[in-house]
Amino acid sequence: QVQLVESGGGLVQPGGSLRLSCEVSGSIFNNYARGWYRQAPGKQRELVAIISSGGSTNYADSVKGRFTISRDNAKNTVYLQMNSLKPEDTAVYYCNAVIQEKRFSNVAQYWGQGTQVVVSS
């Protein structure tokens, strides 16, 4: 059973930093794009950052220059380094992965359980 296990959320003051991690647990055949999304209270879930299997990245305009997404394919883990955090970054952050579980299985999208990030003084 493939699961995405997130960690690293918490409470931080404005201007501070946090690092989120998301590990794929379980046996998989291939791991394609990985991403981070977030959902603030009363708002729709939005894309924060995405990274391809080859390492190409894309960011939401609101986080460019402050957040960095990276991946360690050997560990099946993706990271989100968040610097210069602002109160408007407060949200539940969700990890996303496009995975092929077995050699002849379909590619499917998986989600983590979410980790809360609160930016407040």
Image: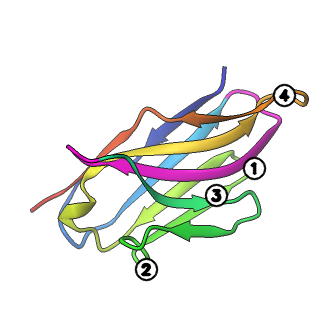
Q: Quadrant of residue 97?
A: top right
Q: Which residue is mark 3?
A: 71
How crowded pointer 2 is (Cα within 10 Å; few <14, some 14-19, many 20+) is rated as few
Give amino acid for label 3: Arg
Q: Is residue 37 magenta?
A: yes
Give the mark, 4 or 3, whose residue is nearer the N terminus.
Answer: 3
Q: Which residue is mark 4?
A: 102
Task: Specify the segment rendered in magenta.
Answer: 26-43
3D distance between C-alphas at marks 3 and 1? 9 Å
Q: Nearer the viewer, residue 103 or 60?
A: 60
The mark tally for this picture is 4
Q: Could you tell me which quadrant the C terminus lies in?
A: bottom left
Taking the image as shown, residue 33 lies to the left or right of residue 47, namely right
Q: Nearer the viewer, mark 3 or mark 2?
A: 2
Q: Nearer the viewer, mark 4 or mark 3?
A: 4
Q: Nearer the viewer, mark 3 or mark 1?
A: 3
How crowded pointer 3 is (Cα within 10 Å; few <14, some 14-19, many 20+) is rated as many
Taking the image as shown, residue 35 lies to the left or right of residue 37, namely right
How crowded pointer 4 is (Cα within 10 Å; few <14, some 14-19, many 20+) is rated as few
Residue 65 numbered mark, or none? 2
Q: Which residue corresponds to the image point at 69% horizontal and 46% vertical from the top-left?
A: 75
Q: Nearer the viewer, mark 4 or mark 1?
A: 4
Give amino acid for label 4: Lys
Give amino acid for label 2: Gly
Q: Nearer the viewer, residue 73 or 93?
A: 93
